[in-house]
Image (spheres, rainbow, N blue to C red):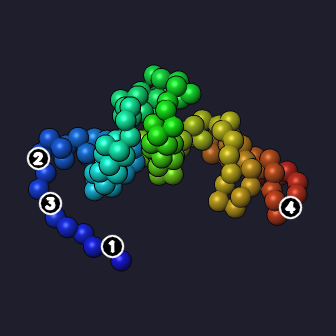
Amino acid sequence: MATTSSIRLSDTIVAQARRDADTFNRTISGQIEYWVRLGQAVESVPGFDIDRVRAALNGQLDVRLLAHNELMAFEESLGNALATPSAKSNQDMKALGDAGGAVGYDEQGRLIRTLPGGGVEVLEDPNEGRAATK
């Protein structure tokens, strides 16, 4: 089991970590640990530019223009964001589902389409092998 340590950080760093943690769906301590790992990578790789990674994450830079190590940082950040959606992302997804027409998998692994008013149309059920409406 990993041990933890307490350290002192400026209020500014903690506020920035809180902001970025929300953006990238991490805890504050997870965000600071991520920055530490990035800092280690940055110091060991000439030409690495975190601003380019941020620009790619924000859709302002073509991912194909990233250097190999920048791409690795981009993919890790993107993977973390997708693995743990934010409360706002969950809210947005619920709104899409409530409007009807959204397609995805439910808890039973069925491919469904949401219907206005909260119903679902089962497009594919791996347990039955046929479509049905609920």
Q: Which residue is mark 4?
A: 128
Give the Cα separation between the discs numbered 4 and 1: 45 Å
Q: Position of residue 62 (x, y in %)?
A: 53, 24
Quadrant housing residue 5: bottom left
Residue type at mark 3? Answer: Ile
In the picture as drawn, the residue positioned furthest to the bottom comes out as: 1
Quadrant housing residue 127: bottom right
* Residue at image point 27% right, 73% down: 3
Q: State the SS at label 3.
A: loop
Q: Which residue is mark 2?
A: 10
Indicate whether 107 appears above or below 9. Answer: below
Residue type at mark 4? Answer: Glu
Q: Which residue is mark 1?
A: 2
Q: Which residue is mark 3?
A: 7
Q: Say which label, 3 or 4, has the lower sequence index.
A: 3
For this view, does 55 lie left or right of residue 9? Answer: right
Q: Position of residue 37 (x, y in %)?
A: 34, 51
For this view, does 37 lie left or right of residue 12? Answer: right
Q: Say which label, 3 or 1, has the lower sequence index.
A: 1
Q: Say which label, 2 or 1, has the lower sequence index.
A: 1
Q: Say which label, 4 or 1, has the lower sequence index.
A: 1
Give the Cα separation between the discs numbered 2 and 4: 58 Å
Q: State the SS at label 1.
A: loop
